[in-house]
Image: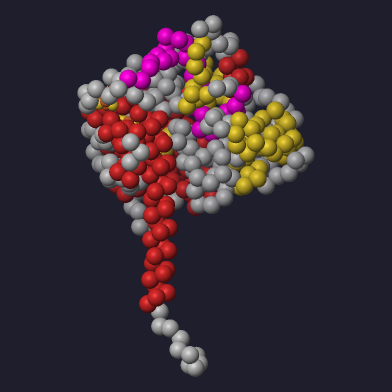
Amino acid sequence: MASELKTFSQGGIHVDDRKYSHESPIEKLPASKLLVIPTSQHIGAPAKVVVAKDQAVKIGQIIAEKAGFISANIVSPASGVVKAIEARMSPTGFKQECIVIENDMKDEYFEAVTDIAPSPEAIEKYDPASAVKQVEKAGIVGMGGAAFPTSVKLSPPPDTKIDTIILNGVECEPYLTADARIMIEDADKIAAGLALIMKIFSKNGPVKGYIGIEANKPDSIQKMSEAAAKYKDIQVVSLALKYPQGGEKQLINAITGRSVPSGKLPGSVGCVVQNVATAAAIFDAAVNNKPLIERVVTVTGLGVKTPKNLLVRFGVMFTELIDYCGGITEDAAMLICGGPMMGKALQTSEVPVTKAVSGILVLNHSEANLYEEAPCIRCGRCVDVCPMGLQPGMINKVIEAGEYEKLEELAIMDCIECGSCNYICAGHERLVQKIKIGKIKLQEILKARKEKEAREKAKAETKAAPQDKPGESK
Ligand code: SF4
Ligand code: SF4
């Protein structure tokens, strides 16, 4: 049974959830002939291409290898031939290096996969020693949108004691319903994935598992509660409707009451957070050797004719998904990759689905709300709603004045880019957009400061070292 409603303690807003596609079961989009695969679909260094033009590839074959600790493998989502390796437009809004694969439609796998069903017995039998390697090989990243490499999250520093694993099934972004549908349709796999993650961490002591879901998804809560009841120490937590309930730090606070300190990671308070779809992918990779080749994407908004949830191979163009949903309406006004709060407006739908794409949103004119910016009236509402306790209006002024050094004491790097301040701002200021620029500027300053300190230290050490005297031999 789900427990009573919980929520995070600081800030937050109430948004109209507009989950138009909630009742639409997941449909599998037919495979495309041509798939475009960017080598950077995750936080961290882009993967390094390890295939050549005209080379034959199979499903699950690594086509770009992780390059560094924070990076992720990219595997082929189809069997076929590499047609090109070139820069193409990606859902980031920029051109990126991409591997273009011509799908031979044979769906041949590079390595054998199994089909062991998720169950407590399957987890009981599973030896977790190779789980992290399997997850890394499969190219799994966080599928809630952040795309942080999952194998890194599953390998915290040895002195970090993890006692709590939280699955994020909140999906607090308005419009998006992919996670809600996965919880309804694949609850057993998600619960098994959580039990497996708990097993990975339990070598250092007992671990509890939670699945956080907002209370506006009673069907997801029911299915997940039934699946979770088969396992020991897993609890479904029903959460109040408050944005950004699905923020990692907010979810930890809502469920455990713990607060992740500024600049620290969830591991600092004994927690690991994974998205529900990621947990299912972890089960598939670890137990069945299945690579990550597809994901569920919500295609929605009043600018699209029939909102749906689609299971899509990576590399398929947004245009194909929108066409499958009946195309756009006459008053379609804006295309967004992701949700309306944290998503990115795009100029073209000729970009491919990647691991981080949870939704494609086509807003019509009335939804798009294209307000003109007006001067700040110092109402203070942005401060009230900020879930990280920041002063977005003040940060905005400092950025406009170009006084980027001051952004450090205003803790700009703590901003989770949730968009709550934008949503509430009486002046319709584009606060988050400016904060993103401010973060880049501050990072440049901090980098330059660090380099200068290193240079001065090296100079001081050279001066302090005893000098050779003429005529002396060593
Ligand atoms: S976008 Fe950043 S500054 Fe604005 S409310 Fe969210 S965390 Fe606070
Ligand atoms: S919400 Fe907007 S208008 Fe109000 S103080 Fe913040 S930046 Fe200024």
Does 172 appear in magenta? no
Asked whether residue 28 appears in the rendered view, the answer is: no
Identify the residue at image location x=49%, y=16%: 334
Q: Is residue 138 left or right of residue 198?
A: right
Q: Name the one closer to the observer, 402 or 5.
A: 402
Q: Main secondary structure of the magenta part?
A: loop
Does 353 appear in magenta? yes
Q: Name the one closer to the observer, 367 or 412.
A: 412
Ligand 2: quadrant of the figure = top left
For residue 165, what is the image quadrant?
A: top left
Residue 278 position, x and y percent, is 47, 36
Identify the residue at image location x=55%, y=22%: 347
Residue 118 position, x and y percent, is 50, 35
For residue 371, what is the image quadrant?
A: top left
Identify the residue at image location x=72%, y=39%: 57
Assign the N terminus to one quadrant of the image. Answer: top left
Q: Name the one closer to the observer, 403 or 440.
A: 403
Asked whether residue 150 appears in the rendered view, the answer is: yes
The number of discs equals: 0
Residue 138 position, x and y percent, is 57, 42
Q: Is residue 137 left or right of residue 70?
A: right
Residue 251 position, x and y percent, is 32, 34
Which color scheme is applied? secondary structure
Residue extending farthest right:
54
**Picture layout, residue 318 above or below residue 236:** above
Identify the residue at image location x=40%, y=59%: 452
**Picture layout, residue 84 above or below residue 447:** above
Magenta segment range? 350-374
